[in-house]
Image: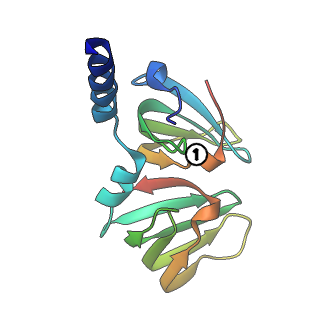
Amino acid sequence: SAPELKSYMDKKLSIQLNGTRKVTGTLRGYDVFLNITLVDALEESADGEKLNIGTVVIRGNSIVSLE
Amino acid sequence: MTDETSNVSAEAEVQEQTILPLEIIDKSIGQYIHVLMSGNKEFKGKLVGFDDFVNMVLEDVTEIDNDGPSPKQIKKMLLNGAHVSMIIPN
């Protein structure tokens, strides 16, 4: 069954990935495995640097949290 | 009865507005992509194809190890999808 992310659609989210990665972006899609599509994504590295990466796919497996 | 059908069409409508992640990967076939792994590795290469597990066949690949050693060039490879963390189309 699909994750209950309808209420997060088109919202700006902060995704915590495994390890130290943090990505922020607008949620544009998801599937049953919690893989997500983010647009206008920014990757924030450990030293605070923000890198614009546009449209990305994040594997559900590696998602620790969404806020 | 009418309640059931309106529920189904509402759900279908939301799903249609969703950009499926696997669609994005499918659209990138033939293009260069950047794959981040769960460890400190990155792979930049041309996506030849992928499967249900997001295992990927890549060509003209640069393997980047972020903990030091210089990048490696790989002509063609099968990347195990198990540790893929993020996929960035160019």
Q: Residue A54 in the image: x percent, y percent?
A: 39, 43
**Which SS class for mark 1?**
helix
Image height of A51 relative to B54, above or below = above
Q: Residue A63 in the image: x percent, y percent?
A: 64, 41
Q: Residue A20 in the image: x percent, y percent?
A: 72, 44
Query: Disc 1 residue type?
Result: Gly
Local crowd size for mark 1, using a 10 Å CA cut-off: few (<14), some (14–19), many (≥20): some
Confirm whether residue A50 shows in the render: no
Image height of B2 relative to A54, above or below = above
Which coloring applies here?
rainbow
- Residue A17, quarter of the rendered image: top right
Looking at the image, which residue is at 73% across and 69% down?
B68
Residue annotated with mark 1: A60
- Residue B10, quarter of the rendered image: top left
Residues A60 and A58: in front is A60
Looking at the image, which residue is at 34% across and 26% down?
B11
Looking at the image, which residue is at 25% across and 13% down?
B2
The C terminus of chain A sits in image quarter: top right
Residues A62 and B70: in front is A62
Image height of A42 relative to B59, above or below = above
Residues A12 and B11: in front is B11
What is the count of numbered marks?
1
The single residue placed furthest to the front in the displayed view is B1
Q: Residue B39 in the image: x percent, y percent?
A: 71, 60
Looking at the image, which residue is at 69% across and 60% down?
B40
Image height of A64 relative to B48, above or below = above
